[in-house]
Image: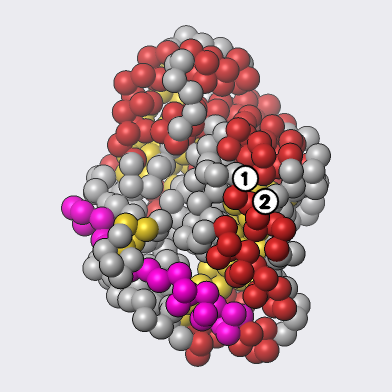
Amino acid sequence: MKIVAADIIVSSPDRNFVTLKITTDEGITGLGDATLNGRELSVASYLRDHVAPLLMGRDAHRIEDTWQFLYRSAYWRRGPVTMAAIAAVDVALWDIKAKAAGMPLYQLLGGASRTGIMAYGHASGRDIPELFDSIRRHLDEGFRSIRVQTSVPGINAVYGVAAQPSSTGQRYDYEPAQRTPLPVEEDWDTRAYLRHLPQVFEAVRSEFGPELPLLHDGHHRMTPIQAAKLGKALEPYDLFWLEDCTPAENQEALRLVRQHTTTPLAIGEVFNTVWDYQTLIREQLIDYVRSAVTHTGGITAMRKLLDFAAQYQIKSGIHGPTDISPVGMAAALHLDLAIHNFGIQEYMKHTPLANEVFRQSFTFTDGYLHPGDQPGLGVELDEEAAARFPYEPAYLPFNRLKDGTVHDW
Ligand SMILES: [Mg+2]
């Protein structure tokens, strides 16, 4: 079965998505997600100008060989643009292989290891009453695990808080990237955050009890010793995880955090290969791998990364906000269902417009996701609908401290 076409579709139904569609001489098509939030057109160009021509005439069944060819023949390895492009090809080829086999993709990955995929949702509020309302709304929607983000007194805009004013009027927790010509500037004060957050978790635990799994995302803003302090302060509230406590390109930094706290740690949404985790996994410095299938070389590379993590009792916590398209989300769900060391899946619902462009077959019932049993990934792209929403430039915000210094966002 030979590849005869590779089309790159950039569409913006409420946010930008880059989708690769591979077509074979047998008429089977496969989809891959290549969305890199705020840098979408770089991956589109990488695919259109440098990868699509190399795919023509290749055997669509040779997934591992194609992955190795794209990774090694470029000579310049790794990086989010390269690995998102490789991921899109990889996932599209898995979609094709599963459709050719007449099976949902998870069957080709070894079959289901569980009946459903525990998902967590994003609750947030500017103050405690608003946060409680948001948690209750998520519980009503069926979520059984909740990420908690709040505003901090003295800081104008904090990552992950939905009700904050945004220049486009969109819910901030749906998409922090704003459709503005320049990135929006936000402010940050780590000491104020460290003082405030334990009180928030104290309030949430006393309102909602000890059972509810609670998560929190530090969004790479702390130094190792600040992260250690926060992990320790949150221990009484029994978090499911503390995410991205430090920037973590410096993997050794996590040694210091780990020595000081038993709060479980999750890291890796900005990583793109197994090498970014080498020390973190081998020294058991984290508990959950946060990579996205979309940004980490696809199913082929994620399977190897998660198998490596499994040897150290480290579990999956696959990245799943709305900058992962329904195609990337479906790929994550098939992998989640098949692997043994599944931990939890991040899940934010896409808007009705996005769901018009991407027709999905995955389900969310009583806190659990399932990819469905259609052959392949189970997602179809409506190209006519996609064409109605052309690309619009959008950038993630950035942070400055009170003295004007640029800080991690
Ligand atoms: Mg995160």
Decide if residue 333 is in sight here: no
| Residue 194 coordinates in the image, percent (x, y) | 52, 74
Residue appearing at x 34%, y 40% in the figure:
40
Say if mark 2 contacts mark 1, CB within 8 Å: yes
- The amino acid type found where label 1 is placed reads Glu
Q: Which residue lies furthest to the left in this view?
A: 181
| Residue 123 coordinates in the image, percent (x, y) | 53, 73
Q: What element carries label 2?
A: helix
Quadrant holding the N terminus: top right
**What residue does disc 1 label?**
252
Quadrant holding the C terminus: bottom left
264 on left or right of 197: right
**What residue does disc 2 label?**
255
194 on left or right of 274: left
- Which segment is the magenta one? 180-201
Is residue 326 magenta-colored?
no
Residue appearing at x 57%, y 58% in the figure:
224
Residue appearing at x 32%, y 21% in the figure:
49
Is residue 183 magenta-colored?
yes
Does residue 54 lie above or below 361 as drawn? above
Marks 2 and 1 sit apart, C-alpha to C-alpha, by: 6 Å
| Residue 342 coordinates in the image, percent (x, y) | 73, 50
Residue appearing at x 60%, y 33% in the figure:
275
Q: Residue 319 carries which label?
A: none
- Give whichever of 97, 258 is nearer the camera: 258
